[in-house]
Amino acid sequence: MAFPIFYSAHTMYLPLPIICFAVLGSSVLLSILSQNANMAASPTGLTLGIAGLAWLSLPRSLRMGEVSLMLALGIGLAMRLIYFASDPIREIDFLRYLWDAGAVQAGLNPFAVGPADAILGHAGPEWATLAARSGGIAEAISYGKLATIYPPVAQLAFWIAYQFDPWGITGLRVVFLAAELAGIWLLVLLLKELGRSPSWIAIYWWNPLIAKEIINSAHMDALLLPALAGALLLAVRARPIMSGAALAVAAGVKVWPLILAPILIWQGKWRAWMTAGIVLVLLTALIATPMILGRLDNQSGLVAYAGGWERNHALFGALREVLAFSFYKMNMLYIDPNRLARIVVVGGIGITAIVLGWRLKDRTKIPAAALTIAALLLLLSPTAYPWYYVWVLPFLCIVPNRGLLLLGVLMSFYYLRFDMVGWGNAHLFDQWIVWLEFGPVFALLAYDWFTGHKSL
């Protein structure tokens, strides 16, 4: 059975030098493999999985005081700098970032037009000129019929990267690394605020999967780290208004952090949290203005993602199948089980956040409550790409739950899907192998829940 194997692997002890060698070695090996990216999918997953198993021993070294802050910072930084010499492995989302940055640089609204319409000349001469200047990037973007999904704060970061390296990935890597460094600094402050050793930032900083996803693949989720860490720190310091403002900035990177509002700003006297709520709503609306002025129809990336996007999920698919079977038995075929499943997930998590926020009396418990919501969102989401692990990993520096740490290893299974697509049997991954990715995590979380096992 997979559960005992991974449970035993999680509790094993490896000496610190071996952990350092494994996580650094993953960056070196994958940088070499990236030179032949078309053949690197399964080896990438295997490399990240093996290095991740070593990373699982890190909490024990941290508890024993073997990791200094300088070592924690140095190893994680080296992992990322090595990737600057690599080619992206099997991911091309960064092409959309470059396109969006080019549109902003040209004074155009990337929320209004998709690259496909720009290429065909359907959006006017300015967009056609931009497509021609992109050097083939416009043609290579996935889902080119859709306008961008990435909110305005992310767009600002893309534009800043463009100033360093127009139409190039290096500028994105520089900006994303800077965002991570800013987030790490805030996590250090937060750990000190809570009386924990700042060396625990190594939980985030040494994770092989995230180092690969943020720098090699240049995924923009790195931009969430400073905003989330800042909102968390301000909430712990009983500054709900400023926390609300930071949360609005986080929502300007990805929309989902808004669901943390009941936990982060529902603190103190009612005037303070009501003011924080007003600030959050107004600032979020202001930041979202370019999206609203763009388009919110079926060619909007945000609308398409919210309405039907699916990839690499387990529980969501099971929930949808249960609903579909129930409606079939009740002869209620007019109800869309996919849409209802999304409503149930969002509604259930939202209610949970409100209950946790209402019951929260001790500000030092805010990170644990926020981790609960972020983890539920990731585990129940219809889309759970490996780089979404950034959603929970910062919280694990403070509340190192072993089931969620295990997830940071098993999400490497996702890379097998690339090969299975080529073999013509991706459906086998989506229906069955995905449970190897999430099943042991659910089992370990359930085991710890029922036995009362505390965080590491």
Image (tube, grey):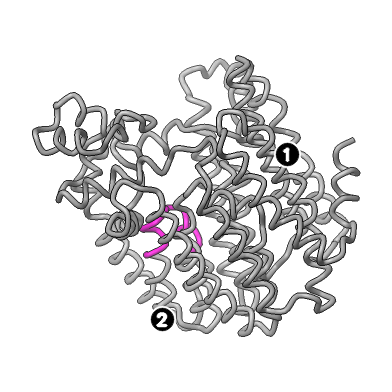
Q: Position of residue 242 (x, y in %)?
A: 40, 78
**Residue 147 visible here:** yes
Q: Work out whether residue 117 or residue 169 is closer to the camera in this orientation and state it.
A: 169
**The C terminus lies in which quarter of the figure?**
bottom right
Is 66 rendered above or below residue 286? below
Is 449 rendered above or below residue 423? below
User: Which region is colored magenta?
Assistant: 249-260
The image's mark for residue 272 is: 2
Q: Which residue is mark 1?
A: 46
Q: Amino acid at mark 1?
A: Leu
Task: Give the image quarter of residue 77.
Answer: bottom right
Q: CA distance from mark 2 to mark 1?
A: 49 Å
For the point 52% across and 19% down, which residue is it? 332
For the point 47% across and 49% down, which residue is it? 218
Task: Give the image quarter of residue 207.
Answer: bottom right
Q: Position of residue 234 (x, y in %)?
A: 49, 79
Q: Position of residue 212 (x, y in %)?
A: 58, 50
- Asked if the stretch drawn in magenta spans residue 250, the answer is yes
68 relative position to 222: left or right: right
Q: Are marks 2 and 1 in contact (CB under 8 Å)?
A: no
For the point 64% across and 22% down, which residue is it? 420
Is 111 rendered above or below residue 297? below
Q: Secondary structure at mark 1?
A: helix
Q: Work out whether residue 42 or residue 1 is closer to the camera in this orientation and state it.
A: 42
Q: Amino acid at mark 2?
A: Ala
The image's mark for residue 90 is: none
